[in-house]
Image (cartoon, grey):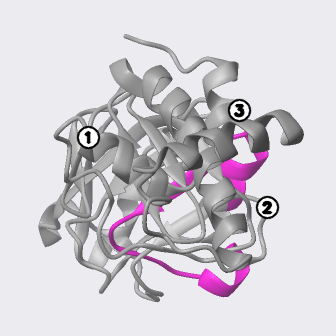
Amino acid sequence: MTRLTQATRDKLKTVSTATLCTALYKRGLRNQFIQDVRPLNPQAGTMVGEAYTLRYIPAREDLNPITVFQDRAHPQRKAVEECPPGAVLVIDSRKDARAASAGSILVSRLMVRGVAGVVTDGGFRDSPEIARLAIPAYHNRPSAPTNLTLHQALDINVPIGCGDVPVFPGDVVVGDGEGVIVIPAHIADEIADEAVEMTAFEDFVTEEVLKGRSILGLYPPTDEQTRVDFAAWRKEKGR
């Protein structure tokens, strides 16, 4: 499996999920932005890490009493204790936020263990406390009831769906103030390189637009003068 290098991780921390969406779209990947999840703390910084997954199924009451948490091999507990440092725990909660995927204690444990972030297409309980933690966390909406009431943890580190996006273990997950995108592991390096280039150009365009320049011929750069001006800008900015 392709591993996320530090160089690629650093590059991805400098680009937006919107830019990454465009780079993926150019490769025919149109469904990589996880739907209906949002950051609990938009100021937490950019989240980047390899996906480590947890899958829930609908709970069956006779198999899912509160005593299941006494089992040290319970999949939710194992996921929290085994998600690697630098990875992102991605939870398939079936897009159902009526019961919580996790709460502040488990998310705190992930933070202390050095996990890069946590994402669910369901909800978190204790969301005000999670929003104050120094770990990026994304969910659909707050949810007070324990996950046992609706969800039964079944598998860890298997392919899942999260917010209508396929997520395979090791895929690269990036989150910012807008949301979360999933990059197939084998193209993460090239997507990161292209996104850095796109970001430089868009920063140049933004400066020009704020000066009063028309977007025609500028964005996209169909005028040769745009290419000349961009080259000069990059030299001046060291980008």
Q: Nearer the viewer, residue 5 or 128?
A: 5
Residue 1 found in image quarter: top left
Question: Helix, strand, or loop for circle 1?
Answer: loop
Question: Helix, strand, or loop for circle 2?
Answer: loop
Residue 64 lies, with reference to residue 227, above or below; the image says below
Residue that carries the numbered disc 3 in the rendered image: 10
Crowding at dot 3, Cα within 10 Å, few <14 / some 14-19 / many 20+, comes out as few
Q: Residue at x 28, y 50 (%)?
A: 32
Q: Position of residue 77 (x, y in %)?
A: 49, 47
Badge 2 amino acid? Ala
Q: Residue at x 53, y 55 (%)?
A: 118
Badge 1 amino acid? Lys
Q: Nearer the viewer, residue 47 or 141?
A: 47
Left-right relation of 182 to 118 = left
Badge 3 amino acid? Asp
Residue that carries the numbered disc 1 in the rendered image: 26
Residue 208 lies, with reference to residue 128, above or below; the image says above
Residue that carries the numbered disc 2 in the rendered image: 134
Q: Which portion, as a residue range, is magenta?
A: 108-131
Question: Helix, strand, or loop for circle 3?
Answer: helix
Q: Residue at x 44, y 59 (%)?
A: 217
Tell me, yes or no, whether the highlighted magenta stretch contains residue 126: yes
In front of the other: label 2 or label 1? Answer: 1
The mark nearer the N terminus, 3 or 1, is: 3
Q: Residue at x 51, y 48 (%)?
A: 174
Whether pointer 3 and pointer 1 mark residues with C-beta atoms closer than 8 Å, the reply is no
Q: In which quadrant will I find the C terminus?
A: top right
The mark nearer the N terminus, 2 or 1, is: 1
Residue 237 found in image quarter: top right
